[in-house]
Image: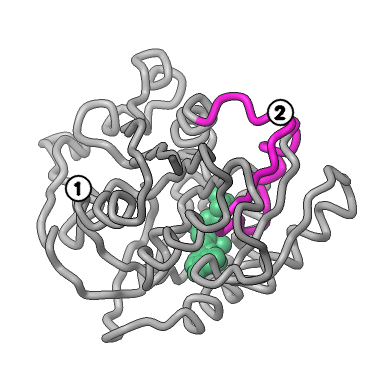
Amino acid sequence: MNTHRSKSNPETITEGEVSRHWDDNADVWTEHVRKGWDTFREHLNNPAFLKLVGNLKGKTVLDAGCGEGYNTRIFARMGAKMTGIDISPRLIEHARQAEKREPLGIRYETASFTNLSIFRDESFDTVVSTMALMDSPDFDKGVAEIYRLLKKNGDFFFSVSHPCFMTRGFGWVTDRQNNQEKLTVSGYFSKTQRVEHWQFSQAPEEIKKQVEQFAIPVFPRTLAEYINPLVSTGFVLKKMVEPRPSAADCREHPYLQKWRDAGSLFLHIHCVKP
Ligand SMILES: C[S@@+](CC[C@H](N)C(=O)[O-])C[C@H]1O[C@@H](n2cnc3c(N)ncnc32)[C@H](O)[C@@H]1O
């Protein structure tokens, strides 16, 4: 997926540290995402997520962990009334600047999805969250806040790295031609929080040499640790999606092939507040 992965091992990572890491990542992240170099988002993750979410026209929607607002703007262009929150003030600054340049009626606030007291109960028809809930030390609190903010029958859609494949011991086994043929899964139950360093693998090599790698705090969870808090909070699970590139997608974007053959990179979940 991404290049130059290396790991350091702090014992526990606080929300304050998550915010600082994402502030440090913010400028390069914003530029590279907007240039389309997050190609797994463009060609695999977003197409499947947008299909799952369906029609948001006229809905009042919260994007929890919106980053610099790339996906928030997509939802707004679909006709949703968007609010985006993120724990990184710098990413929110980038999001607001984009809103100034291209007004889509999006409200952005710096906040943690584990404490959204700036919003009243039942303020939103729908909550979406793309690749953000996995980046917090407290998934369960985030789920409880999102439940509180949803109206009755409100939808909650989110994506995370697939917990069963993107494990601590994730790696590729190569064949004789050096093709990444099989993936390794191990350390599935490891609770060791860590900071991973990587870049978008499809960004130009020249650019990658010029900038710092992203430093991304990682909080390992098993599949059960994603599903059980949803159920115990009161959500009804509607659908899970494990996006798989089609044969045609792989012909157009050959780097997707291994995610057609070996395992699933992302997990998408749709649940409802009854
Ligand atoms: C991988 S980025 C995804 C950003 C955006 N959703 C996107 O798809 O481009 C993860 C985001 O989660 C945010 N984040 C992590 N913990 C958070 C928290 N507790 N509350 C709000 N945002 C959080 C980070 O600041 C970062 O912007």
- Left or right of 145, for residue 248: left
- Nearest the camera: 239 or 21? 239
Rendered image coloring scheme: one colour
- In the rendered image, which residue does mark 1 sit on? 164
Secondary structure of residue under mark 2: loop
| Residue 105 spot, x, y in % from top left | 84, 46
- In the rendered image, which residue does mark 2 sit on? 57
- Span highlighted in magenta in the image: 53-79
- Left or right of 176, for residue 161: right
| Residue 79 spot, x, y in % from top left | 75, 31
Q: Are there few (<14), some (14-19), or many (20+) residues within 10 Å of tag 1?
A: some
Q: Residue at x 36, y 17 (%)?
A: 246
| Residue 141 spot, x, y in % from top left | 41, 68
Q: Earlier in the sequence, mark 1 or mark 2?
A: 2
Dot 1 amino acid type:
Cys
Q: Are there few (<14), some (14-19), or many (20+) residues within 10 Å of tag 2?
A: some
Q: Residue at x 63, y 50 (%)?
A: 62
